Amino acid sequence: MSQEPRTKGERTRARILDAATELFARSGYHPVSLREIAAHAGMTHAGLLHHFPGKEQLLLEVLWRRDRQDATLLFPGLLDGDAADQAGAVSAQQRLQRLVGFVDRNSRTRGLVALYAKLSAEACEPDHPARDYFVRRYRLLREQIAGLLAELFDRSPPPQPADPHAVAQQLLAMMDGMQIQWLLEPDAAPMEQRVWDFLGGFGLRPAETAPEDHADGA
């Protein structure tokens, strides 16, 4: 579970990250300066540098913070080490619904989506500062989504024979590819619907049209 910043330093860092997230989402990474972020956060440039000595470090913390917030919704307990126990409190269908729901959320933050798309391509270079971030991010998403799909496939009537690891990789590639098409031509790329179309091929549907869940604890 996420906690409110407790110390003055934590509150200041949170304010800087809020300001950076808003400006990066609005304008992208390169056009935004640390001085602009500091002004938006209501502090001096020197004060910001005390917490984040460079824009690259600040960017990576913005990315990690968003992922940590998403992880608490998609994979309860993952960051606390109790994923197996806490995930049971949220059904697999609910977690799938949240995962696809992030596609709709992203459609309201075009600048941040564009930032992710550009950085993920740039990070293929061995010396890019965000390379390790994207490698770890995709590795974790593949692992966690594969586990979620394995649970859903096993409970499908009849059980779905598809390889959950392969489908997880395909799903991530499809979602990222749809985001690029949406950035280029928003009206021609209904992202959330296309993701459900893909999942429907494996018997997975939105909650409102899915077969009734008879799993224990549902």
Image (spheres, rainbow, N blue to C red):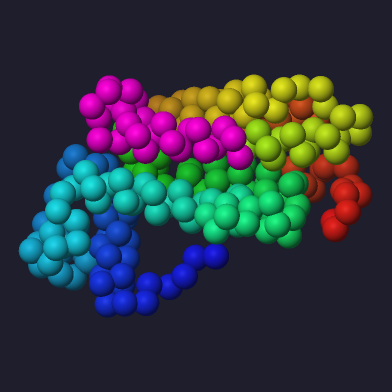
Tag count in the figure?
0
**Residue 103 in which image quadrant:** top right
- Quarter of the picture holding the C terminus: bottom right
- Quarter of the picture holding the N terminus: bottom right
Prevailing secondary structure of the magenta residues: helix
| Residue 67, percent from left and from top | 46, 49
| Residue 102, percent from left and from top | 55, 46
| Closest to the observer, 176 or 111 | 176
In the image, 54: left or right of 138?
Answer: left
Above or below for 50 versus 162 = below
| Residue 149, percent from left and from top | 71, 35
| Closest to the observer, 118 or 216 | 216
| Residue occupying image coordinates x 25% and y 51% | 58
Above or below for 13 versus 130 = below
Residue pushed farthest front?
81
Point out the stretch of residues depicted in magenta: 120-144
Please tell me whether residue 209 belongs to the stretch shown in magenta.
no
| Residue 80, percent from left and from top | 55, 58
**Residue 13 in which image quadrant:** bottom left
